[in-house]
Image (cartoon, grey):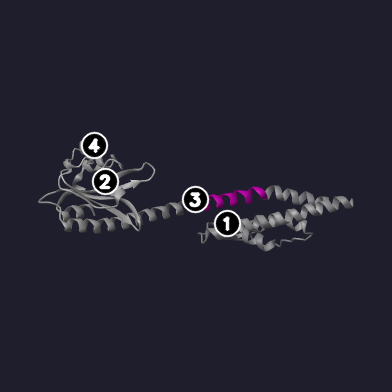
């Protein structure tokens, strides 16, 4: 856009300055591609709002045309001094997005003659196009940042669910085992309290399983990590996992193992979870 702005107005160069609300300054963000080191130097120079031509364009929301910048005390000489670029003439227009002025588009040093009405009109069109392009890029960047934050939060949530469900299983199994044992006591009060503990532990176990299932549902489709394992080992693990819950519910859980030691290619974690959900 900067190259096109310089070409269409017959200027030596063009640049865009955007307003920074935090510092309340204008900053160069783009310049013609042939500016080279001058363009890099410009991007390090903040332009004050109250004492510069660009600041007046921004604040007054109007086009300023100068065929001789030395006649205007608002000319920001510091930019020329630091960049080594001499500004002789200038046309600057506000960059508007909807009802907001977001920056300034400038073309400097008319190569032949003076700035024309066509220059003014073309600069306003380019400024409008630039404002839309920059705002779209900003919104896309904000959307990407928000999406990255959501992905990070989702990962943290999934990690928490995975860790919490894993760490809670072992102590919960112990609670279920001891509570089942206490239910066999002859004391009615002991049986009553043990039953209350068992009921709460069962609800907690169901909650853990729901958390684990939710994690896998939220993760969506995921490749299976297959291993060659004995089928008997998978059944035994599921049996062990469900035994404490069966005892708590006064259920009898019987496992009938195959006579042959069969090897299967399965995802051990996912198949184990499926079997445990069926048993519970």
Cα–Cα span, label 2 and label 4: 13 Å
Q: Position of residue 267 (x, y in %)?
A: 56, 58
Which stretch did the figure color magenta? Answer: 151-168
Q: Residue furthest left?
A: 112
Quarter of the picture containing the N terminus is bottom left
Q: Which residue is mark 3?
A: 152
Around disc 4, counting alpha carbons within 10 Å, would you say few (fewer than 14), some (14 to 19), or many (20 or more)?
Answer: few
Q: Which residue is mark 2?
A: 54
Q: Which residue is mark 1?
A: 215
Cα–Cα span, label 1 and label 2: 54 Å
Which of label 1 and label 2 is nearer to you? 2
Earlier along the polypeptide chain: callout 2 or callout 4?
2
> Would you say the residues marked 4 and 1 are in contact, meaning their CB atoms lie under 8 Å apart?
no
Residue at 86%, 50% (x, y): give it.
190
Secondary structure of the residue carrying tag 3 is helix
Cα–Cα span, label 4 and label 3: 44 Å
> Would you say the residues marked 3 and 1 are in contact, meaning their CB atoms lie under 8 Å apart?
no
Numbered mark located on residue 224 in the image: none
Residue at 67%, 50% (x, y): give it.
169
Earlier along the polypeptide chain: callout 4 or callout 3?
4
Q: Position of residue 106 (x, y in %)?
A: 23, 49
Earlier along the polypeptide chain: callout 1 or callout 2?
2
Residue at 73%, 56% (x, y): give it.
202
Secondary structure of the residue carrying tag 4 is helix
Quarter of the picture containing the C terminus is bottom right
Q: Please indicate, yes or no, whether residue 29 appears anywhere in the rendered image.
A: no
Earlier along the polypeptide chain: callout 4 or callout 1?
4
């Amino acid at each position: 856009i900067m190259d096109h702005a310089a070409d269409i107005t017959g200027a030596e160069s063009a640049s865009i300055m955007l307003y920074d609300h935090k510092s309340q300054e204008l900053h160069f963000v783009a310049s013609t591609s042939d500016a080279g080191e001058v363009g890099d130097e410009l991007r390090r120079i903040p332009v004050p709002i109250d004492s510069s031509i660009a600041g007046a364009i921004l604040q007054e929301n109007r086009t300023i045309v100068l065929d001789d910048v030395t006649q205007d005390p608002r000319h920001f000489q510091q930019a020329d001094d630091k960049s080594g670029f001499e500004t002789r003439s200038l046309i600057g227009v506000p960059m508007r997005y909807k009802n907001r002025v977001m920056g300034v588009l400038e073309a400097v040093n008319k190569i032949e003659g003076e700035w024309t009405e066509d220059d003014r009109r073309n600069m306003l069109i380019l400024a409008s196009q630039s404002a839309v392009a920059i705002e779209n890029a900003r919104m896309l960047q904000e959307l990407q940042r928000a999406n990255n934050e959501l992905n990070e939060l989702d990962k943290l949530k999934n990690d928490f669910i995975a860790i919490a469900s894993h760490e809670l299983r072992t102590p919960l199994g112990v609670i279920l085992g001891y509570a089942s044992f206490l239910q066999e006591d002859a004391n009615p009060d002991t049986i009553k309290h043990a039953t209350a503990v068992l009921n709460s532990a069962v609800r907690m176990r169901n909650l853990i399983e729901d958390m684990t299932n939710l994690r896998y549902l939220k993760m969506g489709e995921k490749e299976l990590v297959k291993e060659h394992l004995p089928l008997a080992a998978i059944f035994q693990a599921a049996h062990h996992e469900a035994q404490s819950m069966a005892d708590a519910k006064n259920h009898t859980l019987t496992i009938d193992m195959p006579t042959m030691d069969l090897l299967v290619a399965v995802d051990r974690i996912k198949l184990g979870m499926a079997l445990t959900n069926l048993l519970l």
